[in-house]
Amino acid sequence: MNILINATQLGRKNGMNNALSNILSAMTSTYGSASFIVLVKKSGVQRVVRRNNVFMKVVPGWIPFPIVEQIIMPILARVTKVDVMLSPYNTFPLLTFGIRNVAIIHDLIFMGAIGGGLYQKVANMYRRLIVPNAKKVLSEILTDSEFSKNEIVKLLGFPPARVTVAPLAVDEALSRYLKQNVSASSLVNFLPREYIENIDGYFLHLSALDPRKNTEFVIQSFVRYKQKYHNNIGLILVGKLPSNLIPIVSEREDVAYLEYPSTKVLASLYKHCIATLFPSSYEGFGLPILESYTARRPVITLNTSSLPEVGGDLALYISELDEELMINAMHRARYDKNYLSYFSNSVVDWCKRFSWEKTAQAYGDVLKLEKHNLHE
């Protein structure tokens, strides 16, 4: 079995490419008898695992993604006589030459309003042009959650029997750091000492320019939480911050901001927080919940989209973006002994439900691969 995979965006650091890197590693190890031809640009070569069944085809960096996907990929698939084309970026080739065409569609948020920066807007416009053709040209779709599957069936009219849910897992590099014993004193290595010395713990929030992450709501809820309880708790924001929020954050001594922390630093932040605040309005999977759980830290999130699938009954859910609900959940995350005991006793078993090996198995079933581990 020969599989052609478009991995030409691997050089870009984001959740989609982290997932692809881990999936490639798990699949190429589990299915040693299959051959994986990986289309990649020079910037992403280091993220492709080196194995005897992996063959890289390096594409010049100047070639735009749509040209790679719509022209180079199907022509190469035909010339090399592959059995399957696998597209992992929410889009896929429209030209198939009769070759099985499988796509990974993480979510369909791009089918709504087109927001974000220029790159994101252009990418979403391309997706909205291609994805409605799914029923015509795709053999199967792989997705991350039952929520996303239902969206795909509803919005694209795709047959449910041909949509397979394969939940994601925590990035292997991050997972290794999350499982290490790291002292809270290490926080002074990347946060101002005076900040660390003046707080009695902190909440963590993964911020983003995307308004669905609700970063402004998190900050407003935190401010009201401090007004209500008059404590020395801090808030640490990780990721890009909307420009209108920068002055607000800069004025507060109890809020710290790290835009690009390393994997090791992010792990440390997860491990020592009171809880992760993740009230996102829409997620195809909601990986930060699983990351926080792996660090054995609770999560406060909305009970919408895919989030309950990942959070299970361990998350502290709010039903809407209501500051009072958020404040109460934050207080519970710190002081509710019954909840914290239940969380502590259950979180390890919950995390065992998610692994890249299980993801690879689901992918292999769809691609009709014969299991043969390279290490056997």
Image: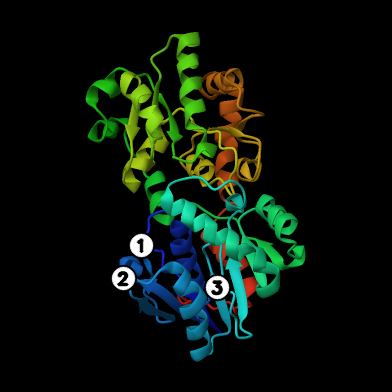
Q: CA distance from mark 1 to mark 3?
A: 18 Å
Q: Earlier in the sequence, mark 2 or mark 1?
A: 1
Point out residue 44 in the picture as x, y percentages from the top left corner. Answer: 35, 66
Q: Secondary structure at mark 1?
A: loop
Amino acid beneath label 3:
Leu
Residue 367: quadrant of the picture: bottom right
Q: Are marks 2 and 1 in contact (CB under 8 Å)?
A: yes
In-front residue for pair 25/281: 281
Q: CA distance from mark 2 to mark 1?
A: 8 Å
Is residue 358 something one can see in this rendering? no
Residue 327: quadrant of the picture: top right
**Screen quadrant of the N terminus:** bottom right
Q: Residue at x 40, y 29 (%)?
A: 244
Amino acid beneath label 2:
Lys
Residue hosting label 1: 11
Point out residue 61 in the picture as x, y percentages from the top left corner. Answer: 33, 70
Residue hosting label 2: 42
In the picture provided, is 148 more to the left or to the right than 212? Answer: right
Residue hosting label 3: 86
Is residue 301 something one can see in this rendering? yes
Point out residue 164 in the picture as x, y percentages from the top left corner. Answer: 67, 63
Q: CA distance from mark 2 to mark 3?
A: 20 Å
Instruction: Rate crowding at label 2 as few (under 14), some (14 to 19) or many (20 or more) other CA atoms within 10 Å.
Output: some
Q: Which mark is residue 139?
A: none
Q: Secondary structure at mark 3?
A: strand
